[in-house]
Image: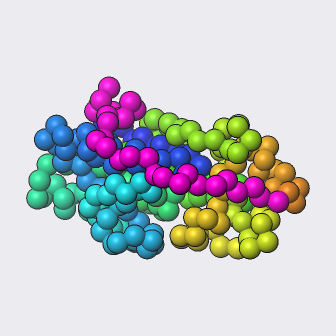
Amino acid sequence: MAKLYFYYSAMNAGKTTILLQSAWNYRERGMYPLLFKPRLDTREQQGEIRSRIGLSSEATMFSPEDNLLELTRESLDKHNVHCVLVDEAQFLSRAQVLQLAEVVDELDIPVLAYGLRTDFSGELFEGSRYLLAWGDELREIKTICHTGRKATMVVRVGEDGYAVTDGAQVEIGGNDRYVSVSRKEFKQIFWGGKKVRFLDRPEQEPEQGGLLPAEDDPQSS
């Protein structure tokens, strides 16, 4: 039975890589996954989802006014759709989350949405709020804070190294301005005025190699 899955995490937990692994798993079995990506994310080439480690796949871009149920039906007119995968799902509107629920309930197609849970001020994104409310399966993708605790929050950092506490919720790109931290660290940074600690990135990216089946992929269980 098809379900609406929401895979959520803080930043840099590998959400997009896992999405692309899931897409690979479907294609490897001769099945067709339909990939969606919000058009407001302009960091990469339009019509493409790309992970930080260089994996990529074609995707259908959507705008806030687009109807994802109708876009899925249009794709079904061309070929069978076995799964819908949504990158940066926090940018979905309330209406679009409901449309994805209709993809599951009316078309019996599983939907796997991947995104952030909260913004830089600790507030839920609109898309995340309704995915948490209406999703059938909620699965956390874990990453760690520099303290060693699990990172569940994100802070936006100014040029002075301190947390930005106001401003627009959506700011695409500038990943070096965001740090994933634990709740305890978030409170000390966002409200307590603690300076943000940046970690040095590894000198060499991990080898890409072949894609392995994701343990939480509905098709691999």
For residue 116, side relative to residue 64 (left or right)? right
The tally of labels here is 0
Dominant secondary structure (helix, strand or loop) of the stretch shown in magenta: loop
Q: Which residues are magenta?
A: 195-221
Q: Position of residue 81 (x, y in %)?
A: 19, 48
Q: Residue furthest front?
A: 203
Residue 129 shows in the view: no
Q: Residue furthest right?
A: 192
For residue 70, side relative to residue 145 (left or right)? left
Q: Relative to 140, say whether 191 is above or below.
A: below
Q: Residue at x 52, y 40 (%)?
A: 141
| Residue 103 vs residue 143, the one in the foreground | 143
Per the image, is 99 magenta? no
Per the image, is 196 magenta? yes
Q: Position of residue 169 (x, y in %)?
A: 63, 68
> Quadrant location of residue 191?
bottom right
> Quadrant location of residue 123?
bottom right
Q: Residue at x 19, y 62 (%)?
A: 74
For residue 10, side relative to residue 81 (left or right)? right
Q: Position of residue 89 (x, y in %)?
A: 46, 56
Q: Residue furthest top?
A: 221
Q: What's the coloring here?
A: rainbow
> Quadrant location of residue 158?
bottom right
Q: Position of residue 139 (x, y in %)?
A: 50, 36
Q: Residue at x 81, y 56 (%)?
A: 189
